[in-house]
Image (cartoon, rainbow, N blue to C red):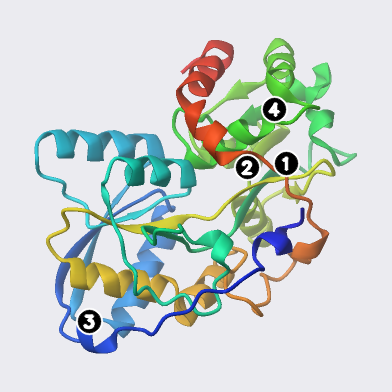
């Protein structure tokens, strides 16, 4: 499977309900794992198109966001209107708990069906992959494979994000342990040889960019953006394949401003937001759009296949196994 094959397929399209949403206004609260600087730009661009809607943002790692929302539901007062996180499994969990609002009329023209929940409760907004970042001052021969990180010399200089904090790491670890050539043996070897876990992908970027570690596992856009800004890092799409996430967006059941929340979802799925995503270093979801400068043709990227139902069922066990190996 290639990255392009994920972003192609039968397209679903519906008409944008302009009339229904024309009067939307007021305030919405977005819970997100997207970096603060990027989210500030998202809000600014959204408000350029929709100044009548005020967007408040609470940003943290997916695990903390899920815990916060769980506590709010337990108190009978969810505060979020929108969830925008890099974790399809967490979204599926929320859906299974009846905590997402189905949005049957979401504008899906040009968006592959593979990125859309069949029940229209959440929608992928961008494509992200996890691969290898390395410090170009410290590493003279670039790694090409995940296996390259497991040697004693490399593992001792490797950092990764933790699934106890990062949604992208949940998917990456869950994907890797389903691969016959890796499994938990791969992570056990990394731990035995001195690899460490930080929190989110940001901690990985900081450690490698500062030269505290030579290698890391990270979502591609962080590494590519840092490289473009002159940081001594580069990024590798490993030969064995990459894990993928789609950063879905969803409306929280219990939102007190559903119409404004729908406007935000519509905007996220539209051309303006997708152009901004490319500018921020993400693979776009809309067909026909060119990926960011310096990114490979999606058709050349191999994707590691995994069973999402098994990943969800094994989620807590995977987190415990990871914590046993790397702490947390």
Secondary element under disc 3, as helix, strand or loop, is helix
Disc 1 marks which residue? 132
Please report the residue visible at 66 percent of the width from the left and 27 percent of the height from the top: 177
Report the front residue among 92 and 58. Answer: 92
Q: Return the residue found at the far left.
A: 76
Q: Position of residue 196 (x, y in %)?
A: 61, 21
Q: Are marks 2 and 1 in contact (CB under 8 Å)?
A: yes
Please report the residue visible at 63 percent of the width from the left and 60 percent of the height from the top: 229
Disc 2 marks which residue? 218
Q: Nearer the viewer, mark 4 or mark 1?
A: 1
The image's mark for residue 55 is: none
Secondary element under disc 2, as helix, strand or loop, is strand
Instruction: Relative to 228, say whether 268 is above or below.
Output: below
Disc 3 marks which residue? 21
Q: Are marks 4 and 1 in contact (CB under 8 Å)?
A: no
Q: CA distance from mark 4 to mark 2?
A: 11 Å
| The image quarter in which residue 157 lies | top right
């Amino acid at each position: 499977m290639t990255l392009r094959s994920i972003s192609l397929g039968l397209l679903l399209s519906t008409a944008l309900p302009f009339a229904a949403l024309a009067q939307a206004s007021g305030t919405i609260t977005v819970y997100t794992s997207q970096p603060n600087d990027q989210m500030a730009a998202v809000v600014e661009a959204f408000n350029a198109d929709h100044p009548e809607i005020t967007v408040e943002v609470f940003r943290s790692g997916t695990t903390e966001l899920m815990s916060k929302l769980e506590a709010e539901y337990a108190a009978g007062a969810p505060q979020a209107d929108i969830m925008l996180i890099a974790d399809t499994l967490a979204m599926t969990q929320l859906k299974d708990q009846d905590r997402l609002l189905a949005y049957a009329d979401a504008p899906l023209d040009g968006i592959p069906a593979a990125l859309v929940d069949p029940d229209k409760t959440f929608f992928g907004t961008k494509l992200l992959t996890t691969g290898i970042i390395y410090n170009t001052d410290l590493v003279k021969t670039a790694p090409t494979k995940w296996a390259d990180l497991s040697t004693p010399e490399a593992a001792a200089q490797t950092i990764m994000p933790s699934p106890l904090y990062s949604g992208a790491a949940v998917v990456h670890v869950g994907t890797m342990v389903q691969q016959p050539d890796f499994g938990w043996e791969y992570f056990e070897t990394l731990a035995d040889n001195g690899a460490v876990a930080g929190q989110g992908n940001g901690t990985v970027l900081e450690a490698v960019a500062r030269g505290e570690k030579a290698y890391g596992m990270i979502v591609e856009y962080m590494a590519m953006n840092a490289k473009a800004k002159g940081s001594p890092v580069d990024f590798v799409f490993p030969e064995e394949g990459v894990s993928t996430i789609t950063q879905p967006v969803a409306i929280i059941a219990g939102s007190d401003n559903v119409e404004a929340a729908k406007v935000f979802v519509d905007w996220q799925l539209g051309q303006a937001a997708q152009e901004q995503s490319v500018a921020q270093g993400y693979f776009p979801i809309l067909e026909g759009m060119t990926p960011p400068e310096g990114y490979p043709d999606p058709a050349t990227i191999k994707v590691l296949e995994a069973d999402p139902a098994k990943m969800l069922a094994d989620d807590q066990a995977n987190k415990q196994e990871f914590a046993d190996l790397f702490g947390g």
